[in-house]
Image (spheres, helix red, strand yellow):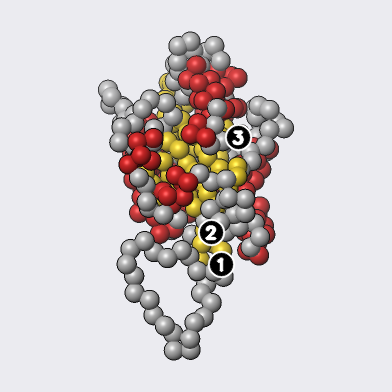
């Protein structure tokens, strides 16, 4: 279900963005981001928790946090701070056209928005190590299927902000804003949301709401349940694999790594127990994707093998 959403939503968004191409006022990036967050909200039974701040402040558009609360060492997490940009078409005199990110070097001075995003993430805001990303939105007319080593241009694609910051510093030329310039390193929404489903031997935490429990005639049995394996280690590994295939990747030796000691505020959010104080500290919409999977579980190596075989492909979720 989660993977189905990841493959369907970019197509739906591309069609929506296509409709406003010739309007005097276009949908803003915030509209696409809100639609994405709304689409994720019904997926709570799959370990997806969406929270909104009482009042959004300026800055990045959303946070995504992959969490493994049962991992040894106080749990682990990978936090993504995401800034979104939509593309624009430029028509040429010969009738052809190309697509580019008009505001990629936004800020005063030029390019300062990206630098601010990268610098802010480097401070570990809220006490959490943070990886800054760009999420690019494309209308239907801008889409292209995968071609050889080049990934598809979809309704949503993603790049690491550290690959963008050096290019836009001080402003950049139009050719450096072209969608084609960044395509080689594109990740897709399915790369972030399509993960193997694993069969875990221990039962999940008791539900927060009152529930009825049944005693089986044969006595107590070891319960098994399905969980999606978006473990922070696996998410980091996939991002590193994709980035390693890309051209124009800054700091080629840089590796994304998860962090240890999951904050208590994230644990409360996973349990649906966000306090007023917690909500007051939220600065932007937040998605938490939590899994009970740990590295010690026998299913972990199976999930890792599946991730390496099937980048962003449907995996039963």
User: In this figure, which residue is indicated by the disc labeled 2?
Assistant: 292
Q: Position of residue 190 (x, y in %)?
A: 51, 48
Q: Earlier in the sequence, mark 3 or mark 1?
A: 3
What crowding class fits label 2: few (fewer than 14 Cα within 10 Å), some (14-19), or many (20 or more)?
A: many
- Mark linked to residue 49: none
Q: Position of residue 142 (x, y in %)?
A: 45, 33
Q: CA distance from mark 1 to mark 2?
A: 8 Å
Disc 2, SS: loop
Whether residue 59 is visible: yes
- Mark linked to residue 185: 3
Residue drawn at x 62%, y 50% as measured from the top left: 73
Residue drawn at x 55%, y 52% as measured from the top left: 68
Q: CA distance from mark 3 to mark 2?
A: 30 Å
Disc 3, SS: helix
> Which mark is in front, 3 or 2?
2
Q: Earlier in the sequence, mark 3 or mark 2?
A: 3
What crowding class fits label 1: few (fewer than 14 Cα within 10 Å), some (14-19), or many (20 or more)?
A: some
Residue drawn at x 48%, y 59% as measured from the top left: 317
Image quadrant holding the N terminus, namely bottom left
What is the residue that sits farthest to the right in this orientation? 253
69 and 6: which is toward the camera: 69
User: In this figure, which residue is indicated by the disc labeled 1?
Assistant: 200
| Relative side of 299 to 10, left or right | right
């Amino acid at each position: 279900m989660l993977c189905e959403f990841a493959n369907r939503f970019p197509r739906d968004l591309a069609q929506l963005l296509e409709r406003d191409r010739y309007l005097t006022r276009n949908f803003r990036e915030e509209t696409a981001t809100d639609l994405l967050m709304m689409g994720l909200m019904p997926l709570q039974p799959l370990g997806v928790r969406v929270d909104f701040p009482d009042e959004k402040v300026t800055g990045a558009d959303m946070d995504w946090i992959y969490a493994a609360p049962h991992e040894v060492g106080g749990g682990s997490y990978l936090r993504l701070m995401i800034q979104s940009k939509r593309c624009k078409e430029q028509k040429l005199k010969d009738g052809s056209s190309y697509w580019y990110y008009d505001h990629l070097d936004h800020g005063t001075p030029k390019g300062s928005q990206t630098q601010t995003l990268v610098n802010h993430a480097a401070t570990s805001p809220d006490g959490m190590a943070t990886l800054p990303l760009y999420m690019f939105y494309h209308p239907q007319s801008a889409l292209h299927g995968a071609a050889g080593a080049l990934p598809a241009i979809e309704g949503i694609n993603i790049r690491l902000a550290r690959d963008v910051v050096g290019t836009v510093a001080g402003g950049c030329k139009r050719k450096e804003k072209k969608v084609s310039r960044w395509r080689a390193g594109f990740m897709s929404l399915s790369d972030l949301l399509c993960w193997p489903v694993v069969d875990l031997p221990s039962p999940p935490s008791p539900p927060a709401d009152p529930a009825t429990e049944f005693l089986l005639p044969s006595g107590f049995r070891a319960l098994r349940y399905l969980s999606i394996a978006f473990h922070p280690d696996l998410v980091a590994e996939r991002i590193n694999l994709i980035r390693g295939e890309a051209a124009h990747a800054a700091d080629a030796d840089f590796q994304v790594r998860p962090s240890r000691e999951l904050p208590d505020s994230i644990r409360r959010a996973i349990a649906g127990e966000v306090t007023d104080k917690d909500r007051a500290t939220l600065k932007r919409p937040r998605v938490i994707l939590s899994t009970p999977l740990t590295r010690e579980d026998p299913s972990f190596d199976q999930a890792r093998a599946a991730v390496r075989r099937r980048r962003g492909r449907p995996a039963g979720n």
